[in-house]
Amino acid sequence: MTDPETRILLLKLARESILSKLTGSVLKTASDTADLSEEIKKDGACFVTLTKKGELRGCIGSLEAHRPLYLDVIVNAQNSAFSDYRFAPLSRSEIDSVKIEISVLSERQEISYKDFNDLKKKVIPKVHGVYLSYSYNSATFLPQVWEQLYTHEQFFIHLCQKAGLSPEFVFYNKPKIEIYTVEHFSEE
C-alpha cells in the first residue's frame, strides 16, 4: 500500500487540482511526472470524498483502474468538487473548510451466494465495499458507509435504492454482488 509521503502527495494533488479549476491556474505538481513514484503512475482506481463540517459535500470515483492513479485522483477530485449532481459546484469561499479523503480501491471480486443470509456471511462490514448490479441498474458503497448503515439490512436497502431498485430487492432477488477493499486516508 501507499507510504505516508505518497498519501500526502495524493492529497496535495487532489486539493491543488480543485484550486486550479477554481482559479484557472495550471496544476504544477502533475506537470512533471518524473518526480512521481512508480506506484502512482500505474493504473489505479479511487474515489475522492469531500466533507464540510463532517457532512458529505461531494464524492465521485472510478470503480476500475483505467488511468494512472495520480490522474484518477486529479480528475475525481475535480469531479467531486464541481460535478456531483447532489451538490452545487464548490465555491472559492468553501475550499478552506473542505476536508479531502481518498479511497484507493482494490480490484472487485464477484461473490456467489444462495440467499440474503448467505450474502451476509460473505460481506464483512467496515471491510468490504459493495458493487451491486442488476440489468441496467447499479450502485456502490465504499466500506466507510458501514459507519452510518450498521447492519447488512440497512446497508443493502440503501444500496438497492441508490441503484434505482426497490429497497427490499436484494432480499428476494439475486443481483450481481462484487466486493472490494479500500485503502483510505484523509487530510488532518
Image (cartoon, rainbow, N blue to C red):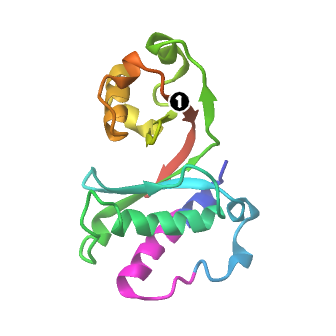
Q: Is residue 32 visible?
A: yes
Q: Tell me the amino acid under the disc marked 1.
A: Lys
Query: Relative to 80, is 10 on the left or the right?
Result: right
Q: Check disc 1 and report its element: helix, strand or loop.
A: strand
- Quadrant of residue 138 within the rendered picture: top left
* Magenta stretch: helix, strand or loop mostly: helix
Residue 69: image x %, image y %? 63, 61
Q: Which residue lies at the image location 55% right of the left edge and 19% below the top edge?
A: 122
Q: Which residue lies at the image location 27% right of the left edge and 56% below the top edge?
A: 86
What range is drawn magenta here? 11-28
The front one of 141 and 32 is 141
Residue 188: image x %, image y %? 41, 56
Residue 32: image x %, image y %? 67, 82
Residue 16: image x %, image y %? 47, 75
The front one of 108 and 3 is 108
Query: Relative to 83, is 105 on the left or the right?
Result: right
Question: Which residue is under mark 1?
Answer: 176
Residue 67 falls inside the magenta stretch: no
Vertical position of residue 70 compared to residue 113: above or below = below
